[in-house]
Every structure is written in structure tokens, then in C-alpha cells.
């Protein structure tokens, strides 16, 4: 019950703020949504605590029947197990803080912001529906809801063309992933005859050797399903190839970025992998694919992060990279570890974004780090918070990131397969780069000489308490989440904690083997992270001319990185432009002559027959009566002839 | 035997007059043939032992309905030539459709079988120990009370419909309001005029009682006065 | 005999007569008060329906089962919304007389009797009570030539259809030996007693019903009557009687004639296909929106008949769900049509809708919802209506029907979307008059139902399922 409240209350808040926002005013709308979120948080945490320590039984909360068509039955139901409860607790908590923070951040808006709060709450609700889904269809509902809300929020400042473009980009790229996801769901239904998780998972052993023939080759059906679902997850979680929307999504207000990156949306993909882990365990090829994609993303995004100048974009690429880590963990079968990282990441990424928001707020909406610097004395609290977030991101002991990121790399090393080792190497390199760009961000923003103009500098001020308060809470989380949750999530007693909510095949002992890896492998990430910090210090404080020199010396590489590996250009050249060309061709040749031609002639036929049909409609009663009689005679004749 | 002969006579006249109802040139003749048909139907009822129905048929249909028809036909100027023109126009197609239908029905009805116990039923239309009228009443008011009441409702609706569609409050129609008539005093209606001897009364000096309805409450003029249906 | 089962009908009849008396004695313009009283009476009837028990009454002539209760709710809802729609219109058009709601009440009563009929005679009387009331309603604006013509046409053709129906009933009676549904079913369970004559009777019965639901080839009256009748009457005529007639159709075909399914299935398929095709094609050329809705309703009935053609519980459920969805879409659309009024003058061509998107966004939004829903675009309710009948058709192996259904809905989408296009993209015309609150209420209620049906379709589905199951034991 509490659980259902946690999920549904944000919807109520959103409805009130969205529908009555104009009537009750901004203040009231904010109060309602935040109150609802707080209630949701309390309920969400209570449900989590009850489950983990209170010994509450797992189960489902059935809300209502949704679809019932033949053998296809779907209910609105909430799944109550550890995985969902963890996600609910995390999402409600972080989302609430972001709501509170938004009061301050959106305080300078000229337009009413009730709509903004309504969207935020609805976003949270969609994510909660997603993580508590008891079946794939409901999950898809939440999935689409999250996508829709991200579109609305990224495009919140709809007067800006760039915001609109970014919103559309996010939507379209997500849609590509969703397409595969939907096909995946269809295949699941086709194979298992149900979309309900419990039914599917129970039936997995019976379908181990089912095959799916495509283009004359047989594939194992489970592999195909997993890969399709993973492609869906790639879209949502911005993995390499489908990542292009994430940096652009920075066009939205910063709290939105924080919400997208920390608590909702991008983590949906990782969550999905954990949710379908009972299937994934039987799809080794898909797991390999996941590892490779995740590892590549981790490294690739980290390299781009090193050269970006927009403060939010740097953090955006770091999200991309961290999500890569999570997929590495999922790919080697350590789903618990990936969820662990997901949770710690939620804390420090929200912290980083909100801190960045605080900086932007202080700098009168300036986002370019090249026009910052020397701020640490003026906004010391934000500065401290940024340190905490960066330490956690870089994985420095004893911050949260240290425990979770190291666990991922340990798991990858312990797995030992070539794919996993690729993941390990990429991860370690990415750890080095992560530390480097984090401190690059810190140093460029807060240290050195100020490069901002004096108008802006005069206005620099520490943010109000509604903004710094959530920061402090998150900083505490970023500090303690690691060592306090480690024992639960990936400790020796993980079976008692997860209770079958994560499917781990009998032969999967990755968590145990993690403890047995050599010391150098365990230490490598931390050492490299420290080296990264040192390098950043050298380049941006000790020898400030060095970056420009390096950029000039390695201009091609620099440009390559600065342009994000030319992904957008590549897509433009390979997909968008040919697509437009094709579209134009289809339009001119296909559409105008053939498609229009055929339907036009069909339409002509239709219109002609319509005319004929209408022509009978003379208005004469006698004609009508005769047509009825003829109808009867015809029916009788048909019956007599064909009976 | 006599029953048989009577049956065929009644039946033959019934069919013949029914055909003449449709085909007679003069509409008044049609109605008269209709009355004849009713009489013969009543005869058939009598033969079947339903004397109450037979009487009702004569009284209601012949006495009321058919006479009403007759009035309508005689009072309304129905242009039968025009109707007939339509008849001739649609006759070929009507005949074709009718023939096909008839052929099909004839083909199908060839398979008609009489249910085993049905002759016994015909011989005893009434439950034992019950009069014809009582049996009819039992059927109507006990067994089929729902249908009876529904039929009543149908008639009520028909009545409402007739009133709604045709009744108009006309300004020219006068109502008798008895209460006002009784309450009227002499002074309201009569005026004594002293007419000088030999001069008579000049025009305009006569006063007539005002029309009551108009004086009291002028009726709104119906928007499309005179556009009948 | 258990007459208390008919309490809703009896109470409604008494209320109707009471309101009639009240209206007559009141002398003067009692249209509004009588409408209100009628709404109250219909609500009371709905409450009584909800509280009633199941069973047979009046020697099997009257029955109450989940199916009749389901359809009575739908009929009463449609009737109430119909009366609400008429409030403003009648006052403005000068036809706000008290007989109007009373006739609607009696028509509703007739429909309730229809869906509760357990005997051919009660069936026929229910139909007549309903039809006669509606003939009068269609001609209610008697000074308008089109209305009078509509009433007359409907009356004459309706009489013909009644004749066909009666002829069919007598044939069935003659060959099966009974008027009672259960007894007919019992008689037909013996294949040797199924003769050709009986099936011909069934064909005549089908013709009678097809006229009432306006299925091809017995649809000819529809466009003229829909266009000519006063708009609230059309809204009512297009919904409640259709529900009643269709439910009766379903009940009679799978009940008494259930054992001869193989004989009539093909005929229903033909009627269904012809209706879908005509509904899709003939609507294209229409410029009058009421006429367009007439063809649209013909098409919709074709889809419902797919459910009947399946002849199983799934098909019936699909048909019932479709009816629910259809009723609300149709009433909503008419709420919008009734709001089409410029300078006090009702306008009804599609071109008059131009610019509605700018002049009255809320109304345009509602109309767009109804049009998209009628076109069957997810996640609006119309999609689910089609989904369930098509699913049933596919499960029963009636691929042809499903395919034609999909094709005709594509064609149909063309003219529905054209309306949306006109509203939003055509050069704006003068704005409509302020719409009265009653229309806004109906449009909003039906619009919300249509939009959010997908969230909680379960109550409707369950009720339809229960209703459909009754007929299959």
C-alpha cells in the first residue's frame, strides 16, 4: 500500500500542478508537488526499509486490469522486490531534492513555473512506473512516459531554437531504441506467450534452445530478445552510437539535466538489464555485446569529456561514461554491482549537476568554463560540494564512487574472458581520464585568474538555502553511500538482500571471485585516478600554457575529440543527409508519381464509387423501399444458393 | 361440411375484396371493399369459434376505423392519379422483385409440415370450462399483461405524436371558459344606448362584447401560420 | 411470475406519464422543467437497474441478465446525454416543447424493453415503442421541411422494416412452434427441425434488425433522416436505438438462432462487409457533417457486426465494447456539431469548422479527439473498439472481415482526418457563438472517456465479458 502511494502520489502532484497550476499559482503548485514528492519519498524509503530490514515479503501490488484480449492479459501492477524497491527509494529521494532545488533555480523565471514542476513530477512518476513495472508492457509505458517527459523538459525553454532541436533529437534517438525495444517485447510475447516478468522468468529454462530464423540463419531466440532489449536500453542510457542526444539534452534547465542524468531516464537502461537478468544469464553473446558497448562508451565518452568547455557538457559526458561502467558490470554478470554503481552514481551525479547549476546560477547563466575561474572564494560552499562530487566521480577513497567503480573493474578483471579484460582496460583508462577531466573542470572553474567580465563577477553570489540544502544532503550521500551500502548490495550476504530479484545463474560466482583478484589490478584504478588529478593540476595550474600547446601540437586529435569523434557529422553524412536525399527522391519520384499516383487513382475510384453509392441516395422513399426489398431478396437468394 | 363450405365462401370473398381494395379506381369503393373484407374476416373468426373477436372486429373495425377511413378519403383531396403514376413507374421492378420473392418463398414453403398435435389444438381453442370472452381476457390480462401494457404505451405515444405533429393553437379557435361565462356581469357585456327617436344609432355607437380570449391574454402568433402538413 | 424484475421499466413508464400530465396541466412552456424531470427519471431508472436482480418474468417474456443490464446502462447514459444535448438546441430552435423529453423517455423505455425481451412479441413491441417515439422526434421541428420529410421517410421505411421483421417472426413461429426465445432455441437444437422456411424467416428477421441498426443494404434512410432530423434527435437516434437494436440483434442471433449459426453467419458477414465499405466510401464526398456522421455510423455498425459474425463470446464482447466506445464518440461529436452556430443560426457543413482550432481550441481539441478515435488511432478508445472485434475475427478465422475492416478504417481515416485538417489548417472563418455549458459538459465528459479509456478499460471489458458469456452458457 505504502508502495503504491510512493508511486502514485507524484502523479497526483503533477496533475494538480499541471491542471490547476494557473488557478492556484506558482507557490501553491510548488508546495503541492514538493509535498507529494516528500510523501512519496517517505513511503518509498519505508517500503525499502521494510523489505530489507523489516522482513516484508516480496510480491506484487495489483492496481487494475489493463488489457485483456484473448490470451493477452496485462494488469496495472507494481512489483515489490528488492530491485524495484531500491530504485523507488533512490528515485523518490533524488527527485525530491531536485524538486526542492528547482524552487531556487527557477526562481528567476519570468513565466509561471507550475508547468515545470508538473513535468518534473510526471517525469518522476513515469520513472517510478518503469521501475515498479510487473510486466514488459507497463515497463514500456513508463519507458515511453520518461521519453515523452524528457522531450517536454529538454524543450522547456521552447523559445530557444536550440532547446527545441535538442528536445527533438532526444526524442528521435530514443525512438530508434524504443523501436527495437518494442520488437523485443513482441518477440518475448511471441516466445513466452506473456509479458509478465514472473511468467517469463519461470519459463526461461523451457526456451533455452528455441531458435529464431532470420535470413536463413538460426539464432537463439533468447539472444535475439536480449540484444533487441539491449538496443532499447542503449537509446535510453545513451550508449555509444545512440548517445548523441545526451549532451544536447543540456539545453534543458539544469535540474532537468540532474534528474535525467542521476535518478531517471538514463538509468532506465541499466535497470532494464538487471530486471531481465534471468534471461540475460542465458544469453552469453548478448552479455558480451553489452560489455563491449559499455566499455567502449566508458572510454569514448571520457575522451570527449577531456576537451569540452561547457561545464554541463563535461558532466554530461561523464554520465555517458559512467553508464558505460554500469553496462560493463551487467555484461560480466555482476548485476548487483551495476545497480550499486547506479545508486552511488545517482548521488554524486545529482550533486555535480546541481553544483554546476549553482555555479551557472551564480555566473548569471554562463556555462562556458573558459569564462570562469577563481570562483572558489566567492562561492565556497558550492566549491566544497563540487569537490565532494568530483572525488566521488573519480573514485577516490572513501567516497562512494571508489567502492562502486572499483567493484565494477574488479568484476571485469575477475571474469577474465577477453571481452571482460577489454572492459577492464577501457575502464581503467577511463578512470584516469575521469579524474583528469573532473579536476580540469574544478580547476578551470574555481581556480586561477577569473576570465569573466566584471559585470558578471559583481553579481556572483552563493545560492540560496533551497539550493544549497539539497547539495549538502547529496554530498553526504556521495560520501557515505559507498561504504554503507557496499555490504548490502555486493557483500557476502547479497542473497539475503536481493532475494531473487536479480537473476543469477547457478554457475555465476562473479561476486565471490571479485575478492580474489591480484592487488595491482585492484589498486590500478585508484592510482591512475590520482595520476589523472596530478596531470590536471600540472596542466591547468602549474603550467597553464600547456593545454594550448598540446592542443596545437596534436591539433587533429584535439579537433577530433572536441567534435565528439565527429559522431554528429557522421550521422549527418551517413544517415541524415542520405535520408533527406532519399526522402526527396521518394517524395518526387515515389510519392508524387507513384504513391500519390496510385492512391490518387484509387482515391478517384473510391470517389467514383462513392458517387455511385450516393447516387442511389435520391431521396425517394420508393427507391429506398425497393432497395430494402431487393436486399432481402438478395440475402435470401444468397442463402438458398450457398447454404 | 357446412363449416367447410362456409369457410371457403368467406375466404374467397375475403381475398376477392382484398384484391379489389388495392385495385379499385374509386377510393370510396376501396374503403367499401375493405369493410366487406372485415365482415368476411369476422365470419372466419366465427367459424373458428372466436365469436367475441368476430364481434369486436365488426364493431371496432367496421363501425369505427373503416368509417373514419371513409371520412378521410372523402374529405381529403387525395390525388390518386398521381399515386397511380408512381405505381405504374415502379410496377415493373416491383413485379420482378415480388415474383422472385414469391418463387423463393414457394420453393421454401414446400417443406411445410404440420406439427403433430396442432389439429387437436385447433379443435379446442379455449381451456376447458371457460367462456370465449373469459379465455381472451385471461390471455390478455393475465398471461400477456406485459405485452398488453406495452401496446397501451405504443398507442399513447402514437397519440402524443399525432398531437405534437398536427395540433396548433390557432388564434381563431375559441374556447368556452365556463367559469368566466358564469362570472360575467351584465355591465361587462351590455350597454344600454339611448337612441334618439327617429335618428337611429350611428355606426360605431354599437358596442359589441370584446372577444374574451384576445382581450385577456393575447396569444403569440405562431411563426408559420397556415403552413400545414 | 416475478414482475418486480421490471421495476425500472415500470417506474420509468409511470414517470413518463407523470411528466406528460405535468406538462399538459402546466400550460405554457414547460420544456426545460420536463427535460430536467426526464433526466431525473432516467437517473432513477439507472439506479433501479443497478439494484435489480437477474431472472425471468412475465412467463419468459421479460428477462434481466448481465447483457440486458449492461446495455440498459449504456442506453440510459446515451439517453441522458441526448436530453442534455437537446436543452439548449430546442430552446433556440423554438421546438422546446415538453413532449420532446417525454418522447425521448418513451423511446428509452422501448429500448429497455427491447434489450430485456425474452419473446418475439415483447421484442416487437419494444421496437415499435422505440421507433414510433423516434419517428415523431425526427419530425419534431415540424415547420422545417427537412425535419418533416425525415420523420415521414423514417416512418414509412420503418413500417416496411417492421413488416419484414413481423413476417420473419411469423415464419419462425410457424416453423419452430414458439415465440419464446428459450423454446425456439430448444426447438432448433434438433437439426431435423431446421427447415429452409425457418432460415428464410431468420433472413427476414435479420433484415428487420439490419434496418434498425442501419446496415447495408437497409441503410438508405440513414443519411436523409440524420441530416433532416433536429441535431439532438440525430445524436440520440445514432446512439441509444442502435445500441438497443444491436444488442437485440446479438441476443436473437446467438440465442434462439444460435444453433443455426452456420446458416446465417455468411449473411452477417456480407452485411458487415457491405456496411464497412459503404460507410468508408460514401462519406468521402459529403460536405454536410451530419450526413457524414450518418455514413460514419453505418461503417461503425459494420465493425460491430464483425463481432456478431464471429458468433462466439469473444466476438460478442468485442461488439459490446465497440458499442460503448461508439456511443461516447458519437455523442461527443454531436455535442460539437450542436455547438456549430453562427449568429444564432445553426450551421452544419464541414467547411464551417474552418479555423475552429484558433477560435475555440478546447472545442477543436475535443473534436480532434473524437475524429482520431473514430479513425481508430491509438491510444484513443476507438482503437480499442476496433482492436477487440478484429482480434475476435482473427481468432475465429474470419481473416477476410478483419482485413477489409482494417482497409476500410484506413479509408475512413481519410475523411475523419480531413475534418481535423479543416479545423486546424484551413483559413479561419468567423467564430462560433458562445457554446452553452450543457454542450461543454457533454463534450468534456465524452472526450475524457474517449481519451482515457485505455487507462482503465477493465470495468467495461469485464462487464462486456460477463454479458457475452451469458449467451454462451
Image (cartoon, helix red, strand yellow):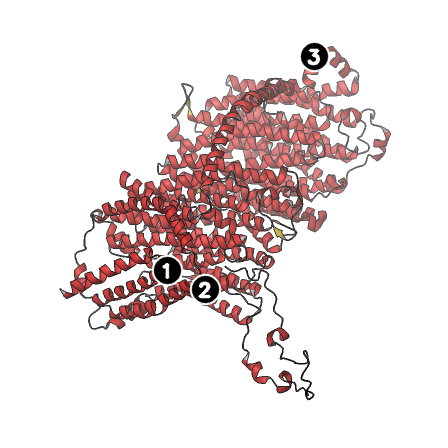
How would you rate the neighbour count of disc 2 (Cα within 10 Å): few for under 14, some for 14-19, many for 20 or more? many
Q: Disc 2 versus disc 3: distance between alpha carbons?
A: 87 Å
Residue for badge 1: B27
Residue for badge 3: A556
Same chain under badges 2 and 1? The reply is no
From the viewer's perspective, is the residue at label 2 or at label 1 nearer? 1
Find numbered disc 3 in the image and state the secondary structure of the residue it sits on: helix
How would you rate the neighbour count of disc 3 (Cα within 10 Å): few for under 14, some for 14-19, many for 20 or more? few
Find numbered disc 2 in the image and state the secondary structure of the residue it sits on: helix
From the viewer's perspective, is the residue at label 2 or at label 3 nearer? 2
From the viewer's perspective, is the residue at label 1 or at label 3 nearer? 1
CB under 8 Å between discs 2 and 1: no
Name the chain letter of the residue that bears numbered label 1: B
Residue for badge 2: C12
Residue A371 falls in which quadrant of the image? Answer: top right
The quarter of the picture where the C terminus of chain A appears is top left
Amino acid at each position: 500500500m505504502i508502495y503504491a502511494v510512493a508511486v502514485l502520489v507524484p502523479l497526483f502532484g503533477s496533475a494538480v500542478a499541471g491542471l490547476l497550476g494557473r488557478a492556484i499559482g506558482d507557490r501553491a503548485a510548488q508546495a503541492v508537488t514538493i509535498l507529494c514528492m516528500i510523501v512519496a519519498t517517505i513511503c518509498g524509503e519505508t517500503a525499502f526499509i521494510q523489505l530489507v530490514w523489516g522482513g516484508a515479503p516480496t510480491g506484487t501490488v495489483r492496481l487494475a486490469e489493463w488489457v485483456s484480449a484473448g490470451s493477452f492479459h496485462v494488469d496495472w501492477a507494481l512489483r515489490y522486490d528488492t530491485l524495484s524497491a531500491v530504485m523507488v527509494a533512490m528515485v523518490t529521494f533524488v527527485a525530491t531534492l531536485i524538486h526542492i532545488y528547482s524552487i531556487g533555480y527557477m526562481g528567476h523565471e519570468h513565466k509561471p513555473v507550475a508547468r515545470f514542476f508538473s513535468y518534473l513530477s510526471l517525469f518522476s512518476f513515469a520513472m517510478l512506473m518503469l521501475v515498479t513495472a510487473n510486466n514488459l508492457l507497463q515497463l514500456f509505458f513508463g519507458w515511453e512516459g520518461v521519453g515523452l517527459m524528457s522531450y517536454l523538459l529538454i524543450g522547456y525553454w521552447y523559445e530557444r531554437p536550440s532547446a527545441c532541436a535538442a528536445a527533438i533529437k532526444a526524442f528521435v534517438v530514443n525512438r530508434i531504441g524504443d523501436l527495437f525495444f518494442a520488437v523485443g517485447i513482441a518477440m518475448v510475447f511471441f516466445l513466452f506467450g506473456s509479458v509478465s516478468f514472473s511468467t517469463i522468468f519461470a519459463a526461461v529454462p523451457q526456451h533455452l534452445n528455441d531458435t529464431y530464423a532470420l535470413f536463413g540463419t538460426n539464432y537463439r531466440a533468447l539472444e535475439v530478445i536480449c540484444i533487441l532489449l539491449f538496443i532499447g536500453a542503449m537509446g535510453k542510457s545513451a550508449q555509444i552510437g545512440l548517445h548523441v542526444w545526451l549532451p544536447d539534452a543540456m539545453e534543458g534547465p539544469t535540474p532537468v539535466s540532474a534528474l535525467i542524468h542521476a535518478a531517471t531516464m538514463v538509468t532506465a537502461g541499466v535497470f532494464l538489464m538487471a530486471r531481465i537478468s534471468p534471461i540475460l544469464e542465458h544469453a552469453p553473446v548478448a552479455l558480451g555485446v553489452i560489455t563491449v558497448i559499455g566499455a567502449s562508451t566508458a572510454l569514448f565518452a571520457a575522451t570527449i569529456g577531456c576537451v569540452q568547455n561547457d561545464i554541463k557538457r563535461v558532466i554530461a559526458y561523464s554520465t555517458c561514461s559512467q553508464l558505460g561502467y554500469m553496462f560493463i558490470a551487467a555484461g560480466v554478470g555482476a548485476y548487483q554491482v551495476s545497480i550499486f554503481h547506479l545508486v552511488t552514481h545517482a548521488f554524486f551525479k545529482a550533486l555535480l549537476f546541481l553544483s554546476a547549476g549553482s555555479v551557472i546560477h551564480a555566473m548569471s547563466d554562463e556555462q562556458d568554463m573558459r569564462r570562469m575561474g577563481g570562483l572558489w572564494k566567492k562561492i565556497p560552499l558550492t566549491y566544497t560540494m563540487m569537490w565532494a562530487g568530483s572525488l566521488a566521480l573519480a573514485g577516490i577513497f572513501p567516497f562512494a564512487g571508489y567502492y562502486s567503480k572499483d567493484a565494477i573493474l574488479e568484476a571485469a578483471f575477475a571474469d577474465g574472458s577477453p571481452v571482460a579484460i577489454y572492459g577492464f582496460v577501457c575502464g581503467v583508462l577511463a578512470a584516469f581520464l575521469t579524474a583528469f577531466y573532473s579536476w580540469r573542470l574544478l580547476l578551470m572553474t574555481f581556480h586561477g585568474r577569473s576570465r569573466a567580465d566584471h559585470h558578471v563577477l559583481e553579481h556572483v553570489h552563493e545560492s540560496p538555502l533551497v539550493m544549497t540544502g539539497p547539495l549538502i544532503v547529496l554530498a553526504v550521500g556521495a560520501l557515505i553511500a559507498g561504504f554503507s551500502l557496499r555490504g548490502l548490495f555486493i557483500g557476502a550476504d547479497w542473497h539475503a538482500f536481493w532475494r531473487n530479484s536479480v537473476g543469477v545463474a547457478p554457475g555465476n560466482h562473479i561476486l565471490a571471485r571479485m575478492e580474489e583478484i591480484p592487488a595491482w589490478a585492484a589498486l590500478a584504478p585508484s592510482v591512475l585516478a590520482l595520476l589523472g588529478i596530478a596531470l590536471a593540476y600540472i596542466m591547468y595550474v602549474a603550467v597553464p600554457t600547456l593545454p594550448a600547446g598540446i592542443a596545437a601540437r596534436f591539433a587533429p586529435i584535439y579537433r577530433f575529440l572536441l567534435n565528439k569523434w565527429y559522431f554528429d557529422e557522421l550521422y549527418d553524412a551517413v544517415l541524415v543527409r542520405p535520408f533527406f536525399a532519399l526522402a526527396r527522391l521518394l517524395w518526387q519520384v515515389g510519392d508524387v508519381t507513384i504513391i500519390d499516383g496510385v492512391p490518387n487513382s484509387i482515391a478517384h475510384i473510391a470517389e467514383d464509387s462513392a458517387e455511385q453509392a450516393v447516387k442511389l441516395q435520391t431521396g425517394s422513399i420508393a427507391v429506398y423501399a425497393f432497395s430494402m426489398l431487393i436486399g432481402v431478396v438478395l440475402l435470401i437468394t444468397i442463402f438458398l444458393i450457398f447454404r | 361440411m357446412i363449416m367447410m363450405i362456409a369457410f371457403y365462401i368467406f375466404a374467397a370473398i375475403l381475398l376477392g375484396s382484398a384484391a379489389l381494395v388495392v385495385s379499385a379506381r374509386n377510393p370510396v369503393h376501396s374503403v367499401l371493399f375493405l369493410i366487406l373484407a372485415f365482415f368476411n374476416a369476422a365470419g372466419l373468426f366465427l367459424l373458428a369459434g372466436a365469436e367475441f373477436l368476430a364481434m369486436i372486429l365488426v364493431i371496432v373495425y367496421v363501425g369505427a376505423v373503416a368509417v373514419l377511413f371513409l371520412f378521410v378519403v372523402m374529405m381529403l383531396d387525395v390525388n390518386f392519379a398521381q399515386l397511380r403514376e408512381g405505381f405504374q413507374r415502379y410496377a415493373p421492378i416491383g413485379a420482378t422483385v415480388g415474383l422472385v420473392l414469391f418463387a423463393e418463398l414457394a420453393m421454401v414453403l414446400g417443406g411445410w409440415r404440420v406439427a403433430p398435435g396442432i389439429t387437436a389444438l385447433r379443435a379446442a381453442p379455449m381451456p376447458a370450462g371457460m367462456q370465449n370472452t373469459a379465455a381472451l381476457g385471461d390471455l390478455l390480462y393475465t398471461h400477456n399483461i406485459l405485452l398488453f401494457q406495452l401496446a397501451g404505451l405504443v398507442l399513447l405515444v402514437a397519440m402524443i405524436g399525432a398531437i405534437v405533429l398536427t395540433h396548433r393553437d390557432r388564434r381563431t379557435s375559441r374556447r368556452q371558459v365556463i367559469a368566466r361565462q358564469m362570472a360575467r356581469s351584465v355591465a361587462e357585456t351590455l350597454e344600454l344606448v339611448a337612441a334618439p327617436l327617429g335618428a337611429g344609432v350611428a355606426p360605431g355607437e354599437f358596442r359589441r362584447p370584446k372577444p374574451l380570449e384576445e382581450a385577456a391574454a393575447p396569444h403569440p402568433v405562431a411563426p408559420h401560420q397556415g403552413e400545414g402538413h | 411470475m416475478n414482475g418486480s424484475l421490471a421495476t425500472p421499466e415500470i417506474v420509468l413508464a409511470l414517470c413518463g406519464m407523470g411528466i406528460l400530465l405535468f406538462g399538459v396541466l402546466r400550460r405554457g412552456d414547460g420544456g426545460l422543467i420536463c427535460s430536467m424531470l426526464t433526466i431525473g427519471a432516467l437517473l432513477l431508472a439507472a439506479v433501479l437497474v443497478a439494484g435489480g436482480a437477474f431472472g425471468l418474468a412475465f412467463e419468459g417474456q421479460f428477462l434481466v441478465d448481465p447483457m440486458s443490464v449492461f446495455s440498459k446502462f449504456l442506453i440510459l447514459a446515451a439517453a441522458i446525454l441526448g436530453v442534455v444535448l437537446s436543452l439548449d438546441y430546442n430552446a433556440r430552435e423554438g421546438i422546446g416543447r415538453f413532449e420532446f423529453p417525454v418522447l425521448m423517455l418513451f423511446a428509452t423505455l422501448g429500448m429497455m424493453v427491447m434489450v430485456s425481451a425474452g419473446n418475439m412479441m415483447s421484442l416487437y413491441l419494444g421496437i415499435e415503442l422505440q421507433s414510433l417515439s423516434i419517428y415523431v422526434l425526427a419530425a419534431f421541428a415540424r415547420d422545417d421541411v427537412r425535419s418533416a420529410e425525415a420523420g415521414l421517410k423514417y416512418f414509412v421505411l420503418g413500417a416496411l422494416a417492421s413488416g419484414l421483421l413481423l413476417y420473419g417472426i411469423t415464419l419462425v413461429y410457424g416453423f419452430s412452434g414458439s415465440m419464446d426465445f428459450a423454446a425456439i432455441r430448444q426447438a432448433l437444437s434438433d437439426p431435423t427441425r431446421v427447415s429452409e422456411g425457418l432460415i428464410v424467416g431468420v433472413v427476414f428477421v435479420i433484415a428487420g434488425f439490419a434496418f434498425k441498426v442501419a446496415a447495408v443494404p437497409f441503410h438508405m434512410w440513414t443519411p436523409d433522416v440524420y441530416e433532416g432530423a433536429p441535431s439532438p434527435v440525430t445524436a440520440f437516434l445514432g446512439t441509444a436505438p442502435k445500441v438497443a437494436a444491436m444488442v437485440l440483434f446479438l441476443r436473437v442471433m446467438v440465442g434462439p438462432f444460435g444453433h443455426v449459426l452456420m446458416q446465417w453467419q455468411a449473411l452477417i458477414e456480407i452485411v458487415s462487409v457491405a456496411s464497412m465499405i459503404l460507410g468508408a466510401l460514401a462519406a468521402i464526398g459529403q460536405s454536410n457533417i451530419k450526413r457524414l456522421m450518418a455514413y460514419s455510423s453505418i461503417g461503425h455498425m459494420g465493425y460491430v457486426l464483425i463481432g456478431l459474425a464471429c458468433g462466439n463470446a469473444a466476438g460478442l464482447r468485442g461488439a459490446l465494447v465497440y458499442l460503448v466506445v461508439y456511443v461516447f464518440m458519437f455523442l461527443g461529436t454531436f455535442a460539437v456539431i450542436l455547438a456549430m452556430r453562427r449568429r444564432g443560426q445553426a450551421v452544419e457543413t464541414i467547411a464551417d469548422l474552418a479555423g475552429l482550432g484558433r477560435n475555440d481550441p478546447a472545442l477543436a481539441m475535443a473534436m480532434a479527439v473524437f475524429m482520431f478515435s473514430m479513425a481508430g488511432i491509438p491510444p484513443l478508445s476507438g482503437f480499442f473498439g476496433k482492436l477487440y472485434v478484429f482480434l475476435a475475427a482473427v481468432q475465429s478465422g474470419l481473416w477476410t472481415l478483419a482485413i477489409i475492416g482494417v482497409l476500410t478504417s484506413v479509408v475512413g481515416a481519410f475523411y475523419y482526418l480531413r475534418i481535423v485538417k479543416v479545423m486546424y489548417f484551413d483559413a479561419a472563418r468567423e467564430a462560433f457563438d458562445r457554446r452553452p455549458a450543457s454542450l461543454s459538459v457533454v463534450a468534456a465528459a465524452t472526450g475524457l472517456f474517449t481519451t482515457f479509456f485505455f487507462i482503465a478499460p477493465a470495468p467495461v471489458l469485464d462487464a462486456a465479458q460477463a454479458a457475452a458469456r451469458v449467451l454462451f452458457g
